[in-house]
Image: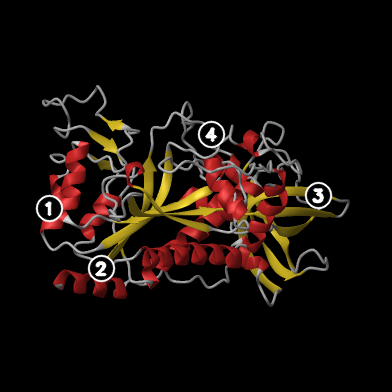
Amino acid sequence: MFGARCLLRALRSCSSAPCPRHKLSAKLSVRDALGAQNASGERVKVQGWIRSVRSQKEVLFLHVNDGSSLESLQVVADSSFDSRELTFGSSVEVQGQLVKSLSKRQNVELKAEKIEVVGNCDAKAFPFKYKERHPLEYLRQYPHLRCRTNVQGSILRVRSEATAAIHSFFKDSGFVHIHTPVITSNDCEGAGELFQVKPSSKIKVPEENFFNIPVFLTVSGQLHLEVMSGAFTQVFTFGPTFRAENSQSRRHLAEFYMVEAEISFLESLQDLMQVMEGLFKTTTMTVLSNCPEDVELCHKFIAPGQKIRTYAKKQLSNWGADLHTEHEKYLVKHCGDIPVFVINYPLALKPFYMRDNEDSPQHTVAAVDLLVPGVGELFGGSLREERYHFLEQRLARSGLTEAYQWYLDLRRFGSVPHGGFGMGFERCLQCILGIDNIKDVIPFPRFTHSCLL
């Protein structure tokens, strides 16, 4: 406590560097400059990248963007500025006066007094061309550059806003954020689709394994959250997960982000579904409210171009068989293209940790999936089996008793009814933006035979 007080005192005593006597230009983001209410000639400095250049006899027009908004700031400069270095893609620092614009296309513009080219760009060699709308498949070839396009900029801003909305939802709901490990000895799903972690051959390890046991990249933080739910009634995690699926489909990635939560003293699927619905609604409404231009861009130029798949009406599945993507999408379409909850799956289809409903002859578990338009499954959750003897029998039948003895211990020492869920973050973005391929909503997609950068 003494150390914390000393640190606080030191921070309070810190002073900023003395201000120079001459007035400096205030540094503004493009977003803040565009939102200025009283643009009356105040001097500002804007830094960013040139999105377009238009030269006339006596005046030069630039559009500069710094990633803070979809709209660029118009810079008006005297034709005396050397326009040869002011090319599409070049980075610049512009100082001048922020004034009201005479054009109806924008409210303000920057009347340039000084333009400094920070970094040149060879527009001819640059893979993206001004005013050319490149297909998303083409952009994926340039993971180091595609973030500079309008569409990827919009997607990444939405991703950032959705991330903040998720954290805000959980914080406002009283959840504790837990950092679950990326390296684990558990296979939560039991599917065997794991990336094993080993030290490089340059490192000499005296034992057979670095950790003495085989370890893997996590497929889920659920089991670690269940540990924490024995001390905190509401916990969540939000981080990368990994699946070694040999698939290049539009729905799969080898590395993706999962939002997972566990809630103690939870006894009904209905209560769990309310939290799932609240998270999805809050995230979606926040994005639509705070990023309207970015969402509109995706809906206008991406979503309409996607193929609309139809599914013939047919028997979804025999009892005891799992639902596939086409079944999930048909259910959503059949219910009016709105999110749909599916509950109580056959026990044989689900992992050992899901609670037995004891409802023979169907014999189901208290599991729930949330299916959404265009994507299919977005959330998966369940009540967890908190009864020691039921769980012990399930583990024994699966031959997992020894490996999960610690999991049984959680039921021996103060066990409570609890449940939880996981949401695929990229699939959530696909649903909101109408983007068909999951590879386009993550900055650096990893999938089989592809790990660029």
**Disc 3 and disc 1: Cα gap in Å?**
70 Å
Horizontal side of 379 relative to 132 (left or right) equals left
Q: Position of residue 330 (x, y in %)?
A: 59, 47
Q: Mark 3 touching mark 1, by CB under 8 A?
A: no
- From the image, state whether disc 3 or disc 2 is nearer to you: 2
Q: Mark 4 touching mark 2, by CB under 8 A?
A: no
Q: Position of residue 448 (x, y in %)?
A: 46, 29
Label 2 sits on residue = 265
Lower sequence index among marks 4 and 3: 3
- From the image, state whether disc 4 or disc 2 is nearer to you: 2
| Residue 363 shows in the view | yes
Label 1 sits on residue = 409
Q: Quadrant of residue 144?
A: top right
Crowding around mark 4 (Cα neighbors within 10 Å: few <14, some 14 to 19, many 20+) is few
Horizontal side of 160 relative to 244 (left or right) equals right
Residue drawn 42% across the image and 48% down it: 257
**Disc 1 and disc 4: Cα gap in Å?**
40 Å
Crowding around mark 1 (Cα neighbors within 10 Å: few <14, some 14 to 19, many 20+) is few
Residue type (three-letter) at the residue carrying disc 1:
Asp
Q: Mark 4 touching mark 3, by CB under 8 A?
A: no
Residue type (three-letter) at the residue carrying disc 4:
Ser
Lower sequence index among marks 4 and 2: 4
Q: State the SS at label 3.
A: strand
Label 3 sits on residue = 54
Q: Quadrant of residue 200?
A: top left
Q: Position of residue 367 (x, y in %)?
A: 37, 54
**Disc 2 and disc 1: Cα gap in Å?**
18 Å
Residue type (three-letter) at the residue carrying disc 2:
Phe
